Amino acid sequence: MTETHQKLIDCIRKVATGQEYSRDISREDASDAMQWILSGEADPIQTAVFLIALRMKRETPEENLGLQDAISDSMTPVSVGVEDLCTLSDPYDGLARSLPVSVFLPATLAACGLPTYSHGVKSIGPKYGVTHATMLDALGYDSRMSDKQAATQLEDPGIGWAYIDMEQFHPALFALKDLRERMIKRTALSTIDRALSPLQASKTNILVTGHVHKAYPEIYLGLAKNAGYQRALTYRGYEGGLIPPLHQKVTMFGYLDDAREYQSTFDPKAFGINTQVERISSEELVFEQLRDSGMAALQGTRNTSYQSLVIAGALALMGAGHVLQPQQAIERVRAELDSGAVLARFERALHSNGVN
């Protein structure tokens, strides 16, 4: 038995002794245990017990950071030839109720001058919802392009956006997909997925993500700092995603270059937006619904998808520090949608990878 294997066993003995006697483990121990799991040599039952036990006792910030350390250390980020780069992160298990209009958000931000990519997987439990990869593949985009191909798209001044799949940028973590599905319940990995940084700019890297529960702003911002993001933003979005409510105030949690955290409020009603997000009308027809509604929005039709992109885009521009005033951010996104610039970038990416 190797020293690293023994470390996983020792960690299980600490965290899996029931509600009353389970103990927290150190950041270093969590990292060592996760390193063994990522090696592919760990016993699947031991891996499952470890991750579920952590969740049942509730992971500490140090434990989360330790798991993230191991995942980051086993991944080699690809450098992108841009100064600023925004990472968008929807839930890896997708959306089951609200239409995933955020699939058009990277192209929207790129048109606003902010190179942007999203990352995820095509399908994973426990929700098995609609993901960026699913919708992009249906629209004709190659969701399995390599990280270097994604970097090339981001560097292209006429595109500036991309999607990258975990299967490509972190095969060892992706290899746990089947086990994660068999565990049924979410683990800490579902949280850490959202703060990964597979592509990196030369100057400023920005993370924008959504959350549901009140405890998660602090968790996500801590993980973002540990991943090396110079700026980060999170807000409550539908199903924990990137599309916020369109009929009520949105509380933004983030930090800028000095890493000091801030909290501010954004009210869509102040800009004439007061509607519910678009819901998935039918699982069987979700692609047609997204294509029709989303592509119309990219052509300047002021439907619900358009309003979703305006609000989510404005929040991201402010979180990135590119546009600080809400009114200016709103006007910038509207202008790019109305001009057809977003549509042009979206379609150019579809054709550039040879799928269409």
Image (tube, rainbow, N blue to C red):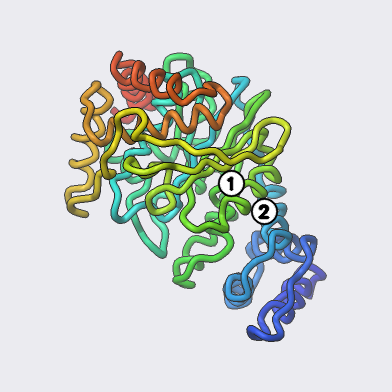
Dot 1 alpha-carbon crowd within 10 angstroms: few under 14, some 14 to 19, many 20 or more: many
Query: Residue 205 location in percent, x, y?
Result: 62, 31
Q: Earlier in the sequence, mark 2 or mark 1?
A: 2
Which residue is drawn at the image coordinates 73% and 81% (left, top)?
13
Q: Are marks 2 and 1 in contact (CB under 8 Å)?
A: yes
- Report if residue 7 is visible in the image: yes
Does dot 1 land on a helix, a strand or a loop? helix
Residue 145, image quadrant: top left
Q: As drawn, which residue projects farthest toward the front?
A: 270
Query: Residue 237 location in percent, x, y?
Result: 42, 47
Which residue is drawn at the image coordinates 58% and 48% (left, top)?
170
Query: Residue 309 location in percent, x, y?
Result: 35, 32
Which residue is drawn at the image coordinates 24% and 21% (left, top)?
300
Task: Give the camera-side residue of 89 and 275.
Answer: 275
- In the picture provided, is 246 more to the left or to the right than 169? left
Does dot 2 land on a helix, a strand or a loop? helix
Task: Give the camera-side residue of 296 and 318.
Answer: 318
Residue 181, image quadrant: bottom left
- Report if residue 348 is visible in the image: no
Identify the residue position indicated by label 1 in the image: 195
- In the picture provided, is 150 more to the left or to the right than 243? right
Image quarter (top left, top right, bottom left or bottom right) of the C terminus:
top left
Residue 68, labelled with which disc? 2
Image quarter (top left, top right, bottom left or bottom right) of the N terminus:
bottom right
Q: Tell me which amino acid carries mark 2.
A: Gln
Residue 162, image quadrant: top left
Q: Is residue 81 above or below residue 40?
A: above
Q: Tell me which amino acid carries mark 1.
A: Ala
- In the picture provided, is 28 more to the left or to the right than 284? right
Residue 116, labelled with which disc? none
Task: Give the camera-side residue of 78 and 231.
Answer: 231
Q: Is residue 83 above or below residue 139?
A: above
